[in-house]
Image (spheres, helix red, strand yellow):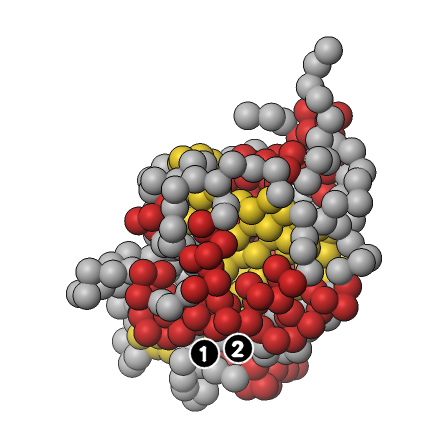
């Protein structure tokens, strides 16, 4: 595939506009009815768009690999996730506007529910309200400010999520996650993957010991897990590589963090996801930018909760509100996809490819007549790596020069 350097040489600035709609966890699987969430949802606007577009299936990382949200989004933005690795901790910190300093190590934290034996029975502590997360973070921060000369910073993110930032000399980010990624297990022990991270592991162990003591009487949020230990990487920006003036319309902090990391302007949205507000932000800012990343989280959270009908309703709301709002602006290129699949029947991310729709003025549509996984298997785009999508958007927006003489 083309490298970023190839694309940097070919990219050119034009007035054309691209809207990239990312329905988090878009892909699904059939339940007992024999239909996936997309097949069960009533989506006349998406179906009509599919009839006029090119459709296919995309692998966020590679066939058979279950991606995290970070790698999936990197691929959407044109960065090969096998080349560029960005830890979840960095994304959480940047998403809330925290300015990471060189050498800082960040981790994504979850408040969790533990039973009497210390086994995780809810990885998200019942999705506690954000206000409760703020209170718990303040409680931890008041009691844990420094460990072995390392400054400990604890910042609330959203619902059950928080960011842990360690600031000091000689810290490494080679730590294994303590989150086992499923219920019925105890949090994993803190382990360093290299000698340079041994001190960090020791500090994190002491942090967790103290945190569990302070949270013991705070059920359902009576424990924590940590994952995605990382430092801020040096990644080239979308304006630099693709000659874009990009903007992000996303409610959840992690996705705002990733967008900020690759050089997007973050457009303010309400604290709670409101599709009408997302449409308003797009409409109000449409003349100022030429690439818009619009993110919807509800499709993923319903999938993770095993809420098939909830995911169906979320898809129908997107069809009712966002699709007409986007098309009314007459962008030159529209792409709709997901960062990964989150089938409700699996209650989590999966290795299945994600639907991908490309609509533009200068293309030959295929024979697909509905927006669904099964229909897209027959689409003209075929099956491809998700990172290959952005060059196609740039080309259809006439933002790539000819290659070679």
Q: Quadrant of residue 181?
A: bottom left
Which percent across, then down, holds residue 311?
A: 38, 69
Q: Quadrant of residue 57?
A: top left
Asked if residue 141 can be seen in this view, the reply is no
Characterize the local packing of mark 1: few (<14), some (14-19) or many (20 or more) Cα atoms within 10 angstroms.
some
Picture disc at residue 127 = 1
Where does the N terminus fall, quadrant-wise?
top right
First in sequence, mark 2 or 1: give its number.
1
- Relative depth, front residue between 317 and 94: 317
Characterize the local packing of mark 2: few (<14), some (14-19) or many (20 or more) Cα atoms within 10 angstroms.
some
Cα distance in 3D space between marks 2 and 1: 6 Å
Would you name the residue on which mark 2 appears?
A: 159
User: Is 181 positioned to the left or the right of 319 in the image?
Assistant: left
At x 74%, y 32%, the residue is: 11
Which percent across, then down, holds residue 376?
A: 37, 45
At x 78%, y 54%, the residue is: 289
């Amino acid at each position: 595939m083309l490298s970023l350097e190839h694309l940097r040489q070919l990219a050119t600035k034009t007035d054309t506009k691209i809207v990239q709609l990312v329905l988090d966890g878009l892909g699904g699987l059939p339940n007992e009815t024999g239909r996936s969430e997309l097949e069960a949802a009533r989506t006349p606007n998406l179906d009509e768009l599919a009839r006029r577009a090119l459709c296919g299936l995309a692998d966020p990382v590679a066939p058979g690999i279950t991606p995290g949200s970070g790698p999936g989004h990197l691929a959407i933005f044109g960065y090969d996730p096998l080349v560029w690795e960005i830890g979840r901790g960095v994304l959480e910190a940047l998403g809330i506007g925290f300015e990471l300093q060189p050498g800082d190590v960040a981790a994504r934290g979850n408040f969790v529910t533990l039973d009497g034996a210390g086994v995780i029975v809810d990885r998200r502590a019942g999705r506690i309200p954000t206000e409760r997360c703020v209170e718990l973070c303040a409680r931890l921060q008041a009691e844990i400010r420094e460990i072995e000369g390392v400054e400990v910073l604890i910042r609330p993110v959203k619902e059950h999520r928080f960011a842990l930032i360690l600031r000091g000399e000689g810290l490494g980010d080679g730590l294994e996650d303590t989150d086992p990624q499923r219920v019925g297990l105890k949090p994993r022990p803190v382990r360093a993957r290299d000698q340079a991270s041994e001190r960090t592991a020791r500090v994190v162990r002491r942090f967790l010991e103290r945190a569990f003591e302070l949270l013991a009487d705070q059920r359902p949020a009576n424990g924590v897990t940590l994952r995605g230990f990382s430092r801020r990487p040096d990644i080239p920006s979308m304006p630099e590589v693709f000659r874009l003036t990009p903007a992000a319309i996303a409610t959840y902090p992690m996705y705002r963090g990733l967008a900020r990391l690759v050089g997007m302007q973050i457009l303010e949205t309400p604290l709670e996801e409101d599709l009408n507000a997302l449409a308003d932000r797009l409409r109000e800012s449409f003349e100022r930018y030429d690439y818009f990343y619009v993110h919807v989280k509800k499709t993923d959270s319903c999938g993770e909760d095993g809420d098939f009908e909830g995911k169906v309703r979320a898809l129908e709301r997107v069809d009712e509100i966002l699709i007409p709002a986007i098309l009314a602006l007459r962008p030159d290129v529209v792409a709709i996809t997901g960062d990964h699949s989150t089938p409700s029947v699996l209650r989590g991310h999966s290795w299945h490819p994600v639907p991908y729709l490309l609509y533009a003025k200068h293309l030959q549509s295929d024979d697909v007549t509905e927006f669904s996984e099964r229909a897209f298997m027959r689409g003209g785009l075929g099956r491809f790596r998700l990172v290959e999508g952005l060059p196609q958007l740039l080309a259809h927006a006439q933002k790539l020069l000819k290659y070679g003489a």
